[in-house]
Image: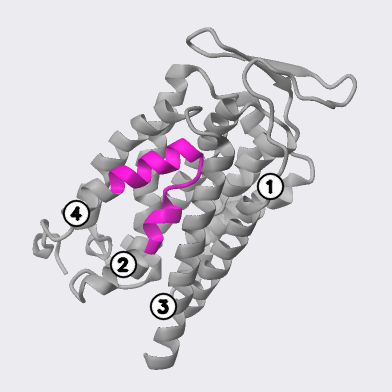
Amino acid sequence: MELAQFDWTLYWFMFPVALCVATTATFSGIAGSALFAPIFLVVFPLLGPEYQFPGVAAAIGVALLTATFGLSSGVVAYLRRRLIDFRSAVPFILVAVPFGIFGAFMLAALKEHQELLRGAYALLMAVLATILFRRRKPGPGAAAAPEGAPAGQAMREIVERDGTVYRFAVPRQGKGAAATGLGAFLTGLLGVGIGEVVMPQLARRNRVPIQVAAATSLFVVVLTVASASFTQISTLVVAGGLAAVPWNVVVYTIPAVIIGGQIGPRLQGKVSQRAVEVGVGCLFTVIGVAMAVTALRNTLFG
């Protein structure tokens, strides 16, 4: 298909949908691709054959590309609020980016195994939902130091643009590096995972204040997703030319996620982190079930 043959009005409805997805993603600190991929893989086929993507790789590639712009917009918003702890983000980035790229290459290698990828996606959603549903003691709020911090552990201070002070023990990745690598690999492979492992490490394990944890997590996520997205889209273009990428979806999703990326950070702190985790956990449960049913149906009935 040449670019001129795309129906540029077919996916008009994705503008409001993408706006909501990007707002949710930047607000909660997860990757928007976690929500876009199921829309492309489960919802689009229900709308009719003309809406269906050519395969899982194209869906995840476009999901990552779209998420990159939305997350970047969210990072800019957090930058303006001066909430990102760049020094704490570095150890996570050094692990996440290479593994994200590796996962993207693996998706290209497995693109012929469509139902296997859908089944893996469903399983991943179930695991992430279980993690989110587990109740743990939340980290302290603004201007509070973590209770029970190891004696002598260095403290860090982040001053928000409005003057709010966040003081906390310097986060340590430690054994969490394995989880970070796995989450990044799954992000490159299936479009989701990195935000769901970095955010808990910062907010739960290290007890970084939620506002700083969300901003820092999003910074790690956007670099990981951008790296995986570049790898995915490059692979699609090399294999099938520019027409291999569904640009008639991207023209609606990218402007919407840029706007949504500015809205999400403004809502940060207005809803409890626990409520956000339960809400996202429920959403992941629904996505996992839908993806599992789709994979099973396609396997049994073709």
Whole-angstrom CA distance, mark 3 to mark 4, is 23 Å
Q: Is residue 213 magenta?
A: no
How are the colours assigned in the image? one colour
Location of mark 4 (residue): 13
Numbered mark located on residue 294 in the image: 3
From this viewpoint, which residue is outermost toward the top?
A: 163
Q: Residue at x 56, y 59 (%)?
A: 186
Q: Residue at x 10, y 56 (%)?
A: 9
Location of mark 1 (residue): 135
Whole-angstrom CA distance, mark 4 to mark 1, is 36 Å
- Name which residue type carries label 1: Arg
Numbered mark located on residue 43 in the image: 2
Please report the bounds of the magenta region as a residue range.
Answer: 18-38
Query: In this picture, is 234 found above or below 41?
Result: above
Counting from the top left corner in percent of width and height, residue 159 is at 58, 12
Foreground mark, 1 or 3, reads: 1
Counting from the top left corner in percent of width and height, residue 111 is at 44, 73
SS class, disc 4: loop
Counting from the top left corner in percent of width and height, residue 272 is at 55, 34
- Name which residue type carries label 2: Val
SS class, disc 2: helix
The reply to whether the C-beta atoms of the residues labelled 1 and 3 are less than 8 Å apart is no
Q: Earlier in the sequence, mark 1 or mark 3?
A: 1
Counting from the top left corner in percent of width and height, residue 274 is at 59, 41
Whole-angstrom CA distance, mark 3 to mark 2, is 10 Å
